[in-house]
Image (spheres, rainbow, N blue to C red):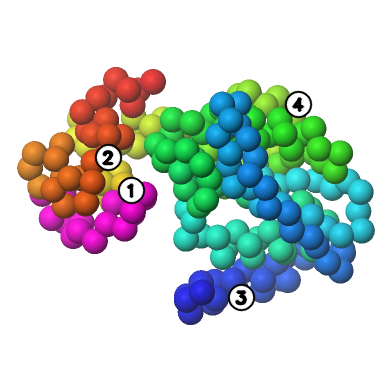
Amino acid sequence: MDDFMQMLINQIKKDYEKSGFPVTVSDYMIEKIMLPMRDGTRMRTVIYKPVGLEKYPVLLRRTCYPHDEGRLKADAENCALRGYAFVYQFCRGTGGSEGDWVPNENERNDGIDTVNWIYEQSWCDGIGYWGTSYAALTGWAFADAIKGKVNSMFLLHYGTDRFVSAYHKGLFHHDVLTAWSMQNAGWPVEADYEASCRYLPQMEVDEALWGGKLPWYRDYISNELKLRT
């Protein structure tokens, strides 16, 4: 763990301590499973549970950011000590989950399947969803389909209109999706960001500078209709 992540984890702990949200249990347990989705693909899922309670409210987060696991563990630990179960799950093709990493495409069904599984567990006493950025999109993706199962959703820094976030007055948002795609290609991309934005034809920047073909990035820049749906 690098110094920045350790500093962040320490700050998260201090924030919980100052929040007025009291510690209610002395320990927690951790369960790690590969949770199967409707098509048999298994998602790496980590569950923190407070010790000494039979049922507890559950906080869920689905993310594509493996580098953020230190922060996830910090939230999970601090919530578990305060009487909540905390479940985090990595999206397809990321963080040890099976399948191919294709942004946006599978989040609705995978989210619904995950919520349904949690809801059926004997220890579940209500579900809340909490996420930022792409981890907010994974909540928005199924928000209309979990009535009666998810009691609350706290979704930060992500809008519900993917087309608006990708285009402005007909121009593609390099600052949003080119940078993000480079950071989340599924492999390390060392290319210069500004050089990537200037590269022409932009349709070939992935193979030319990033080290491989990203069909979903090509969809972003070539298929406005798909982004509108």
> Which disc, if any, is residue 185?
1
Residue span colored magenta: 182-198
Q: How much space separates mark 3 and mark 1, taking CA atoms?
A: 29 Å
Please state the horizontal and vertical placement of residue 70, each as a whole percent of the image: 56, 65
- Distance from label 1 to label 4 (Cα)? 36 Å
> Residue flagged by tag 2: what amino acid is it?
Leu
Secondary structure of residue under mark 3: helix
Q: Residue at x 70, y 38 (%)?
A: 152
Q: Residues within 10 Å of mark 3 (few under 14, many from 20)?
A: few
The residues tagged by marks 4 and 2 sit, at their Cα atoms, a distance apart of 38 Å
Kind of element beneath mark 2: loop
Residue 147 % position (x, y): 70, 25
Tell me the residue at 27%/57% (across/down).
189
156 and 143: which is toward the camera = 143
Sequence-wise first label, 1 or 4: 4
Q: Using the rendered image of the protein, determine whether residue 61 is visible from the camera's viewpoint.
A: no
Please state if 153 lies on the left or on the right of 180 as rendered: right
Which of the numbered marks, if any, corresponds to residue 214? 2
Label 3: which residue?
A: 10
Dot 1 alpha-carbon crowd within 10 angstroms: few under 14, some 14 to 19, many 20 or more? many
First-in-chain label (4 vs 3)? 3
Whether the residues at callouts 2 and 1 have beta carbons within 8 Å, the answer is yes
In this view, the residue farthest toward the bottom is 3
Q: Please tell me whether residue 110 belongs to the stretch shown in magenta.
A: no
Is 32 in front, or is 6? 32
Q: Amino acid at mark 3?
A: Asn
Type of amino acid at the residue the image marks with label 1? Ala
- Give x and y (percent) for residue 10: 61, 75
Q: Amino acid at mark 4?
A: Gly
Q: Tell me, yes or no, whether the highlighted magenta stretch contains residue 189.
A: yes
Q: For the residues carrying marks 1 and 4, which lies nearer the camera in this image?
A: 1
Give the number of the mark in front: 4 or 2: 2
